[in-house]
């Protein structure tokens, strides 16, 4: 299916003129359900150029090597160390596969903390065509770790697969680039829970009703909750189920 993009000269458009290609069911994968599997295995089952939006929240090995529990306490540090951790090579493999499954103009939303933001993330997208198009600061309204200043925020780097454009693609224009939200983590109490309402608004901005949103490292499945609240579908997994 060819995507139809508007060519007007105005910068903003409140209408999305990009459609997801027809998505057929994949043997062994479930829509709108939790799944225990490796995210790379899941994405390799998905056709190229078929998904409008992917969220990715890696468990960065480099952070755990550096922090030695930080100031969040030994208990929280141990819980982080119990999660399967990703080397830079593994993260790069995920991002290359994400680029493959995204439609042209599709978006990758990559969660990072201050350590990754300051130390650099360009190595993660080497060999891809991804371009950074925006950055959102999530104020968690909760004090976290830090050897000097204490961290209240995480960051969402927004990448776009070419062609880079906003009009006719990004249909909501009132999302602030500093977002305050406490996580509602339900009964899962996942160590890296993410803000459901922020993710919901972003999903609404760059997908259409009924589109499929992918999260290959779903953790506490906040993206699934966000997608369903937005009237979209979810396809994702976590290695821990």
Image (cartoon, rainbow, N blue to C red):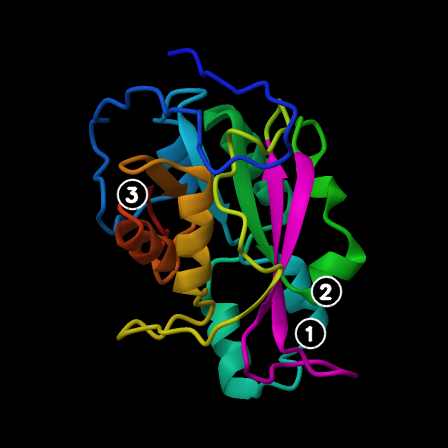
Q: Residues within 10 Å of mark 2 (few under 14, many from 20)?
A: some
Residue position for label 1: 67
Q: Is residue 189 left or right of 123 when viewed as pictured?
A: left
Cα separation, mark 1 vs mark 2, equals 10 Å
Q: Secondary structure at mark 2?
A: helix
Does the stretch in magenta take in 37?
Answer: no
Label 1–label 2 contact, CB within 8 A: yes
Q: Position of residue 89 (x, y in %)?
A: 63, 41
Q: What residue sits right under mark 3 in the picture?
A: 232
Q: Is residue 154 magenta?
A: yes
Q: Which mark is residue 115?
A: 2
Q: Nearer the viewer, mark 3 or mark 1?
A: 3
Q: Is residue 55 left or right of residue 176?
A: left
- Lower position in the chain sequence, tag 3 or tag 1: 1
* Position of 100 relative to 183 (above/below): above
Quadrant of res 177: bottom right
Part of the protein shown in magenta: 131-160
Label 3 secondary element: loop
Q: Earlier in the sequence, mark 2 or mark 3?
A: 2
Residue in the image at 39% along x and 54% along y: 200
């Amino acid at each position: 299916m060819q995507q139809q993009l508007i060519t007007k000269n105005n910068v903003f458009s409140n209408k999305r003129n990009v459609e997801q290609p027809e998505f057929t069911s994949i043997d062994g994968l479930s829509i709108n359900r939790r799944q225990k599997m490796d995210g790379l295995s899941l994405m390799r089952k998905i056709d190229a150029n078929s998904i409008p939006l992917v969220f990715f929240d890696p468990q960065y090995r480099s952070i755990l090597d550096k922090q030695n529990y930080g100031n969040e306490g030994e208990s929280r540090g141990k819980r982080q160390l119990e999660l399967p951790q990703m080397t830079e090579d593994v993260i790069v493999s995920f991002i290359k596969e994400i680029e493959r499954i995204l439609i042209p103009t599709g978006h990758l939303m990559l969660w990072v903390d201050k350590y990754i933001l300051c130390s650099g993330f360009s190595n993660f997208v080497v060999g891809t065509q991804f371009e950074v198009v925006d950055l959102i600061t999530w104020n968690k309204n909760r004090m976290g770790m830090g050897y000097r200043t204490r961290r209240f925020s995480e960051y969402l780097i927004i990448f776009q697969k070419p062609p880079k454009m906003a009009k006719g693609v990004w249909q909501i224009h009132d999302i602030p680039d500093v977002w305050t939200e406490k996580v509602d983590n339900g009964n899962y109490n996942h160590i890296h829970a993410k803000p459901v309402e922020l993710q919901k608004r972003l999903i609404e901005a760059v997908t259409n009703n009924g589109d499929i949103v992918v999260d290959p490292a779903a953790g506490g499945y906040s993206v699934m909750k966000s997608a369903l609240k937005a009237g979209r579908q979810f396809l994702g997994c976590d290695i821990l189920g």
